[in-house]
C-alpha cells in the first residue's frame, strides 16, 4: 500500500517536544456497566490538529469530555505535563470546548455569550467586551455583536460557540462533532475558517467527528477508534501540507487519503 | 509556512440568508394589525351580552334585588364610588403586599432548594401541604393566631399566591442547559456565578409564568380571606362590602363590587403579561414571532 502521505503510527515517530496532554491507560465504565472507553493511550502534542474518528458509540465524545475534566476516568490517568497544578492537584486545564450544539445562552447577545468565559474569570467588563468583539470579528461575525442567538443561523451560532471557545486564547480547543448538524455548504466553509483560525492562533485542536472526509481535510493526525468497547485502533499521520483549500479537497492525494482512512475505519468497525 | 488567504466574511451568502426572518406587521393606530381582532372581538361580545341582559331585565320586569340590569349597576358604581374605591384600595393593597411577599419568599426558597437537595427534601412537602390545604379552612386559625386582622389577611393571600412561584422557579432553576452547566464548570465558575449568570436567567420564563398565576391567586386569596374574616369598621375591603350589601339586599352594590374585583384581576393579569413580554421578547421562544 502506498503510504506517501500516510505515515507510520504515531507512537513510532521520533518524539518532539513534551506533549500537552498524556492519556495513559484510560478506561471509563459508566454506572450502568457500559464500558465506554478501554485502555486508551494518547499523547496530544502542542500545535497538532487531531481528529478522533469513529462510529457512534466508540467513546470518542466520552474521551474528549474526560480530557476536558468533565467526568474522571475509571482507571488510568490524564496528565498535563506542561501546565501548573493547583493545591488539590488539579491541573490548570487551559482549554476551550465546543459542543455538538452551539450551546449558547439564549438570553445573551452574541457578544454576551463570547464574553462569558472572561466574565467568569473576573476580567473587567470593558476589557472583556473589547476582547469578545475582536474574537467575533475573527470568526467572521463583525456586526452581529448585538444579535441574539435566535436571530442567527445555525452556522453563525456555531461560529459564536467557537469564538467563545477561543476567547481565553486556550492552548487546546476540544470540539465534539461541532459541524455535524450543519448543511454541507456551511460545513465546508466552517472547516476552511477553522483551519485558518488554527493556523493563525496556533492552538492544539482535538476534533471529534464521524466523517472520514472532514477528518482527512482538517487533521494532521487521525486517531481511529472502534466501538464496544471504545478503543484506539489506529493512529495515522496525514502528511499533506497546509494550507489546505478546495484544491486539496479535489486532489487525488485527498481521495487516496480518504480511501486509506476509510479502510482503517472499516477495519475498526469490523473488529 | 505561507499565510492562508483571508476568508471572505461569513455573512455574505448561505449563512446570513438562512437567518430567521422576523415579521414586520403594518400598524393601525399604533397597534399591530393582527392585535385589533383580538382586542375588538371580546368587546363586541361583551357589549352584546350586556345589551341582552338589560333587555331581559326590563322585559321580564325582574326586580333589582334579584338581578339588577347593567345600567343600574353602572349608576350604583358611580354613586357609591366613595365607599367602594376605599375598599378597593384596601383589597388591592393586601393583594400587592401578598404578591410581593410571595415573590420574595418563593424565589428565595427556590434558590435555597436548588442549592441544597437536603433542604428541598425536608421542606418541600410542607410547602405542598400549605398549598393543598383549603385556605377557607385554615383562615379562622390564622386570624386567631395573627391577632391583627390585616396581617392575617396578608398571610392568607400569601399562602395562596406563593406556591406557583416556588414550584415554577424550582423547575426553571433546574432546567438550565446541561452543557452550559458543564461549560461553567470548565471555566471554574463559583456557585454564585453559576446562579447569577446561568440558573437565574434560565429560570426567568418559568418564574414569570408563575407570577402570572400568582397575581390572580393573590387577589382571590385576599378576597376569600376577608369573606372568612368578615371584618367591620373603617378598614374594610371589597369582600366586606359584598357581604354587607348582601345582608341589606343592596344587590346592585354587590354587583358593582364584583365588577371591581374582576376588573382588578384583569388589570393584574395584563400587567404581569406585559412585564413578561418586556423581559422575554428579545430571546425567548414564547415571544418569538416568525414568518413561515
Image: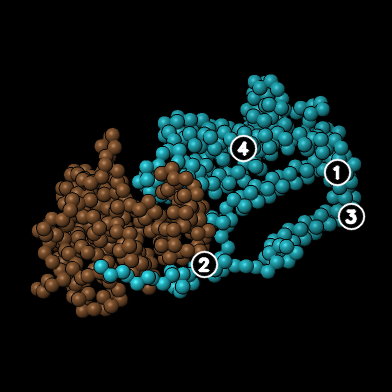
Chain colours: A brown, B cyan
Q: Is A244 located above or below residue B181 in the figure? A: below
Q: CA distance from mark 2 to mark 1?
A: 51 Å
Q: Tell me what residue is drawn at x 21 percent, y 79 percent.
A: A252
Mark earlier in primary sequence (2, 3): 2
Q: Residue furthest front?
A: B2
- In depth, the one of B175 and A177 nearer the eye is A177
- In depth, the one of B112 and B67 nearer the eye is B112
Question: For the residues carrying marks 3 and 4, which lies nearer the camera in this image?
Answer: 4
Residue ID for mark 3:
B59
Q: Residues within 10 Å of mark 3 (few under 14, many from 20)?
A: few
Residue ID for mark 4:
B161
Whole-percent x and y of residue B223? Answer: 71, 36
Q: Chain of mark 1?
A: B
Q: Tell me what residue is drawn at x 64 percent, y 36 percent.
A: B100
Residue ID for mark 2:
B20
Q: Do callouts 4 and 1 mark residues in contact (Cβ within 8 Å)?
A: no
Element on which disc 3 rests: helix
> Which label number is shown at residue B77?
1
Q: CA distance from mark 1 to mark 3?
A: 23 Å
Whole-percent x and y of residue A218? Answer: 27, 66
Amino acid at each position: 500500500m502506498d503510504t506517501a502521505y500516510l505515515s507510520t503510527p504515531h507512537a513510532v515517530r521520533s518524539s518532539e517536544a513534551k506533549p500537552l496532554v498524556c492519556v495513559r491507560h484510560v478506561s471509563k465504565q459508566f454506572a450502568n456497566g457500559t464500558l465506554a472507553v478501554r485502555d486508551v493511550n494518547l499523547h496530544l502534542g502542542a500545535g497538532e490538529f487531531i481528529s478522533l474518528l469513529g462510529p457512534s458509540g466508540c467513546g470518542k465524545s466520552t474521551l474528549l469530555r474526560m480530557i476536558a475534566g468533565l467526568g474522571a476516568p475509571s482507571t488510568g490517568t490524564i496528565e498535563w505535563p506542561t501546565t501548573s497544578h493547583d493545591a488539590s492537584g488539579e491541573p490548570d486545564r487551559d482549554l476551550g470546548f465546543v459542543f455538538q450544539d452551539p450551546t449558547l445562552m439564549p438570553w445573551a447577545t452574541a457578544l454576551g455569550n463570547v464574553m462569558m468565559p472572561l466574565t467568569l474569570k473576573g476580567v473587567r467588563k470593558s476589557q472583556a467586551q473589547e476582547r469578545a468583539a475582536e474574537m467575533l470579528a475573527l470568526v467572521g461575525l463583525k456586526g452581529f455583536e448585538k444579535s441574539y442567538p435566535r436571530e442567527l443561523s445555525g452556522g453563525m451560532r456555531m461560529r459564536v460557540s467557537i469564538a467563545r471557545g477561543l476567547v481565553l486564547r486556550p492552548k487546546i480547543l476540544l470540539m465534539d462533532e461541532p459541524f455535524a448538524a450543519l448543511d454541507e455548504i456551511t460545513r465546508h466553509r466552517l472547516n476552511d475558517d477553522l483551519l485558518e483560525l488554527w493556523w493563525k492562533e496556533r492552538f492544539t485542536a482535538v476534533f471529534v467527528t464521524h466523517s472520514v472526509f472532514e477528518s482527512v481535510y482538517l487533521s494532521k493526525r487521525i486517531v481511529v477508534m472502534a466501538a464496544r468497547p471504545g478503543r484506539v485502533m489506529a493512529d495515522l499521520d496525514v502528511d499533506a501540507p497546509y494550507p489546505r483549500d478546495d484544491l486539496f479537497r479535489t486532489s487525488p492525494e485527498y481521495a487516496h487519503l480518504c480511501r486509506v482512512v476509510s479502510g482503517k475505519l472499516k477495519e475498526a468497525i469490523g473488529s | 509556512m505561507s499565510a492562508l488567504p483571508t476568508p471572505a466574511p461569513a455573512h455574505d451568502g448561505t449563512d446570513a440568508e438562512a437567518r430567521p426572518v422576523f415579521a414586520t406587521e403594518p400598524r393601525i393606530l399604533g397597534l399591530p394589525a393582527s392585535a385589533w381582532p383580538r382586542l375588538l372581538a371580546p368587546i363586541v361580545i361583551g357589549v352584546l351580552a350586556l345589551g341582552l341582559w338589560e333587555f331581559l331585565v326590563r322585559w321580564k320586569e325582574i326586580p333589582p334585588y334579584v338581578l339588577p340590569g347593567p345600567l343600574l349597576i353602572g349608576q350604583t358604581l358611580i354613586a357609591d364610588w366613595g365607599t367602594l374605591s376605599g375598599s378597593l384600595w384596601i383589597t388591592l393593597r393586601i393583594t400587592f403586599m401578598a404578591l410581593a411577599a410571595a415573590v420574595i419568599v418563593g424565589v428565595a426558597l427556590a434558590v435555597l432548594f436548588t442549592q441544597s437537595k437536603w433542604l428541598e427534601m425536608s421542606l418541600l412537602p410542607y410547602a405542598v401541604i400549605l398549598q393543598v390545604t383549603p385556605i377557607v379552612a385554615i383562615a379562622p386559625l390564622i386570624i386567631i393566631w395573627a391577632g391583627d386582622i390585616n396581617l392575617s389577611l396578608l398571610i392568607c393571600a400569601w399562602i395562596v399566591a406563593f406556591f406557583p412561584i416556588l414550584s415554577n422557579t424550582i423547575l426553571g432553576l433546574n432546567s438550565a442547559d446541561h452543557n452550559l452547566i458543564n461549560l461553567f464548570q470548565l471555566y471554574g465558575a463559583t456557585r454564585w456565578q453559576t446562579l447569577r449568570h446561568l440558573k437565574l436567567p434560565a429560570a426567568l420564563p418559568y418564574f414569570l409564568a408563575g407570577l402570572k398565576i400568582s397575581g390572580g391567586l393573590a387577589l382571590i386569596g385576599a378576597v376569600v380571606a376577608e369573606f372568612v374574616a368578615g371584618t367591620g369598621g373603617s378598614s374594610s375591603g371589597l369582600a366586606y362590602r359584598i357581604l354587607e350589601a348582601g345582608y341589606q339586599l343592596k344587590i346592585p352594590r354587590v354587583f358593582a363590587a364584583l365588577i371591581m374585583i374582576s376588573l382588578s384581576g384583569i388589570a393584574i393579569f395584563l400587567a404581569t403579561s406585559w412585564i413578561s413580554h418586556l423581559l422575554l421578547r428579545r430571546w425567548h421562544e414564547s415571544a418569538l414571532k416568525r414568518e413561515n
